[in-house]
Structures are given as C-alpha cells and as structure tokens.
Amino acid sequence: MEYGLQMYSVRDITGRDLKGALKQVADIGYKYVEFAGFFGNQAADVKRWLDEFGLIASGTHTGIDPLLNDYEGTVRYHKEIGCSSIIIPGADLSCQAKLDAFVANVNRLIPKLADEGITLGYHNHGHEFRANRDGSMIHEQLVYRTGLRFEIDTFWYYDQTGISAKGILERLKDRIDCIHIKDGFRRGAGMPLGCGDAPVKEAYDTAKALGMLMVVESESLKPDGVSEARECFKYLRKQEND
C-alpha cells in the first residue's frame, strides 16, 4: 500500500523550507503528496524536488479564485509539476445564490480543465452536510448539479453526521479518487490517526476495498508536523496487518 500526505500536516516547516519538508515526508515513507500552497517556489524547483525524493503530486488544494483569476498560470503550474488533480478546499456556499454562482463556475471549468488533463474536485468540511439558513444543502447540490470529483474528508463527515464515511464512499465511489483519512474527537479537535474517536478503521477498510488513495491530514502539530505524520504512517502500516 502507498499513502499520501496533505502537506498542511507539516505546515510548521513548509512555508520556510518546502524542499526540506518534502524530503522528510518521503523519508517517512509517503509516496504521494497533496500540496496546500507553494510559498513562492517555482514549479520547476518543486518538480525537481519531487523527482529527487521519489514523490508524486497526487493533487493540490487550490481555491477557486486562482482558477477564475489566473486560469492559464494555475494550469501551467500544475502541468509543470505533473499534477493532474485540483481540489477546491472549500468555498463560501452559505446560501443558494452563492451555491448557484459556484456551480456555474465549476461546470464551466470542469471541461476546460479536462482538455488539459486535469480533474477538478471538492474537499468537504462539516458544514456541507447541514442545511444553510435558507435550507439549501451544499454537498447534495454539488453531487447532483456538478461533475466535480469528491475528496471526502472522513473526519469532518463523521464530525457532522456522527457516522462513518463508509456509506458515502460507497455511494460516490465513481467520483472519488482519494480521501482524507483523519482522526479526531467529534465536536473537538483533529488528532493523529488512532488517537481520536472517529471510525478510522472502517474508513480505511472501505477505501482500500474501493481502490481509493488515502491521503493523511493530521492537524495538531503535537509535538510537530513531521512527528505526527510519522505516527499516522505507522498507524496505516499497522492496518495492513490487522
């Protein structure tokens, strides 16, 4: 099994030393990385570091604004680093009008990006699964009104619904390439894998059975991002033998 890491997990070092962060992530054993910003680094340098450390860019968390305001530059950067997945890490979709505008934008972007060999996805938090004040349901509408791919964050789904992500992973399996596998306490903080009360094992088994890439996101930085990422990797390896 090969796993990925959302680089936000090591945000205590990425801003000042992205190259060093990538090396330490690779040394732990991760094969894939999902970027959360490039901190002014040139695409050619990022690609060289990926190749040097044997890493693959599985995706980036990129807001919709860069796609709307600098489409060509955003696409060019992704192609240069060999990344074929852009994942919107959330948006202000707090009413029907904002949802309508977002849906129109992504439906326009999806075929354009497809022509460039890039997919467009959406990463959930918890609020997408509860009704807005006007009654609109964010995630439901994104499913039936768009062609977005979905990166299901299994902890946020559990935090909002109180159940494991198994059902939604199975239901949307044809539109999911990867998940965020994450632990934490419901109505509390995210934690390293195995340290919270989220049903991580069920999410792991489901993603494995469905052939979905598992990308770790661990957020507490206790004692630091790399140590936390290492503990998460050990947890994943242990699941392979359980």
Image (cartoon, rainbow, N blue to C red):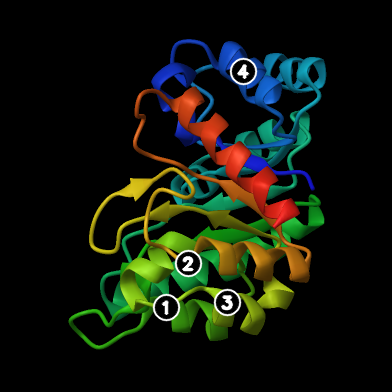
Residue 175, placed above or below residue 8 = below
Cα separation, mark 1 vs mark 2, equals 8 Å
Q: Position of residue 220 (x, y in %)?
A: 34, 37
Mark 1 and mark 4 lie on one chain; the one further toward the N terminus is 4
Q: From the image, tell me which residue sits under label 2.
A: 199
**Which label was assigned to residue 163?**
1
- Say whether residue 127 is left or right of residue 164: left
Residue at image x 50%, y 72%?
104
Q: Residues within 10 Å of mark 3 (few under 14, many from 20)?
A: some
Mark 1 and mark 2 lie on one chain; the one further toward the N terminus is 1
Q: Position of residue 57 (x, y in %)?
A: 71, 36
Q: From the image, tell me which residue sits under label 4.
A: 24
Q: What element does badge 2 sit on?
A: loop
Q: Residue furthest left?
A: 133
Residue at image x 47%, y 66%?
199
Residue type, label 2 = Pro
Mark 3 and mark 4 lie on one chain; the one further toward the N terminus is 4
Q: Are marks 1 and 2 in contact (CB under 8 Å)?
A: yes
Q: From the image, tell me which residue sits under label 3.
A: 166
